[in-house]
Image (tube, grey):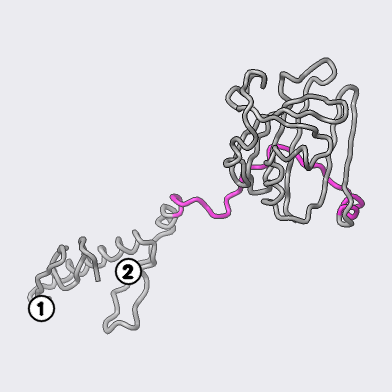
């Protein structure tokens, strides 16, 4: 059945809108009958092409089978597929390279150990820490995005202060301090966010500030943090790092 609209009835001489006038095929000449059959096949083929269903079939449950129409060419399917992104389309690669663990490091990781490596070249240094956490990614990220709790869960963090994130191209001293919990409704797993915060670290009371950019990614979410330019000095000219999670 139909719900309004326009349709083609094989027992009528043209498209109708909900009504039709029957006619007899016996009244047509051979030329008119051939032309009428050609119009009917053409209409059926176009309707099938628009819905993406092959028109080369017959309905055995129907008292009379439909006349078969020629199969469509591959280019007809290509037009349809071209409007829909492929489900297995490759995602953008991660904007950083992960360190490669040796077989011994992987064994230690499976045994519950924390893998930590550091290297130094002159006045510059780098390093990484790998830890197997027995928790789903969303639990890990809810902790990492809860900056207010850092003094409670990270021993080297003594205090924390959030700031607005409206002037990222200049120092945090030009931003305004905000109350704890400000913006927490947007700092959740799966939601991109930018957070600016200042921290007091270690027993030496080192004051730093950083910009945190959290980005969800199909290969594993990550959060880049960069040292605020207001905190650079002759000793610490710059610092950056990445939190990254990967399911295993």
Q: Is residue 37 above or below residue 162?
A: below
Of the pair 91 and 23, the residue shown nearer to us: 91
Secondary structure, magenta segment, majority class: loop
Frontmost residue, 35 versus 117: 117
Q: Which residue corresponds to the image point at 78% horizontal and 41% vertical from the top-left?
A: 152
Q: Are marks 1 and 2 in contact (CB under 8 Å)?
A: no
| Circle 2 crowding by C-alpha within 10 Å: few under 14, some 14–19, many from 20 | some
On the picture, is 198 further left or further right than 100?
left
Quadrant showing the C terminus: bottom right
- Going from the N terminus, do you reach mark 1 or mark 2 first? 1
Quadrant in the picture for residue 227: top right
Query: Looking at the image, is 98 positioned above or below residue 136?
Result: above
Position of residue 119 measured from the top left corner of the image (x, y, whole percent): 90, 33
Taking the spot 36% from the left edge, 61% from the top edge, the residue there is: 51
Label placed on residue 26: 1
Q: Position of residue 23 (x, y in %)?
A: 9, 74
- Element under label 2? loop
Q: Residue furthest front?
A: 179
- Quadrant housing residue 201: top right
Task: Give the alpha-carbon distance from disc 1 to disc 2, as whole Å.
Answer: 24 Å
Indicate yes or no whether the magenta region holds residue 38: no
> Residue 194: which quarter of the image?
top right
Element carrying mark 1: helix
- Where residue 10 appears, as percent x and y from the top left, is 19, 71
Q: Which mark, by number, is residue 69?
A: 2
Residue found 63% across the figure and 40% down from its top = 215
Query: Exactly how many numbered labels are in the figure?
Result: 2
Residue 79, image x and y in percent? 41, 52
Magenta residue span: 81-109
Circle number at residue 220: none
């Amino acid at each position: 059945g139909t719900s309004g609209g326009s349709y083609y009835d094989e027992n009528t001489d043209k498209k109708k809108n909900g009504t039709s006038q029957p006619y007899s095929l016996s009244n047509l000449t051979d030329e008119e009958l051939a032309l009428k059959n050609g119009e009917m096949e053409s209409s059926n083929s176009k309707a099938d092409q628009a819905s993406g269903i092959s028109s080369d079939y017959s309905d055995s449950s129907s008292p009379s089978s439909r006349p078969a129409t020629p199969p469509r060419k591959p280019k007809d399917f290509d037009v349809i597929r071209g409007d829909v992104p492929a489900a297995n389309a490759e995602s953008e690669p991660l904007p950083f390279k992960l360190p490669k663990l040796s077989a011994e490091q992987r064994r230690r990781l499976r045994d519950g150990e924390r893998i930590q490596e550091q290297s130094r070249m002159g006045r510059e240094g780098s390093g990484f820490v790998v830890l197997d956490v027995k928790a789903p990614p969303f639990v890990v990220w809810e902790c990492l995005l809860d900056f207010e709790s850092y003094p409670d869960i990270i021993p080297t963090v003594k205090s924390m202060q959030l700031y607005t994130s409206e002037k990222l191209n200049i120092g945090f001293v030009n931003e305004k301090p905000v109350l704890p919990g400000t913006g927490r409704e947007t700092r959740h797993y799966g939601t991109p966010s930018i957070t600016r915060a200042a921290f007091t670290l270690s027993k030496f009371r080192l004051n730093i500030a950083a910009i945190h950019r959290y980005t969800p990614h199909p290969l594993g979410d990550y959060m880049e943090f960069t040292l605020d330019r207001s905190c650079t000095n002759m000793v610490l000219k710059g610092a950056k790092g990445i939190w990254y999670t990967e399911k295993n």
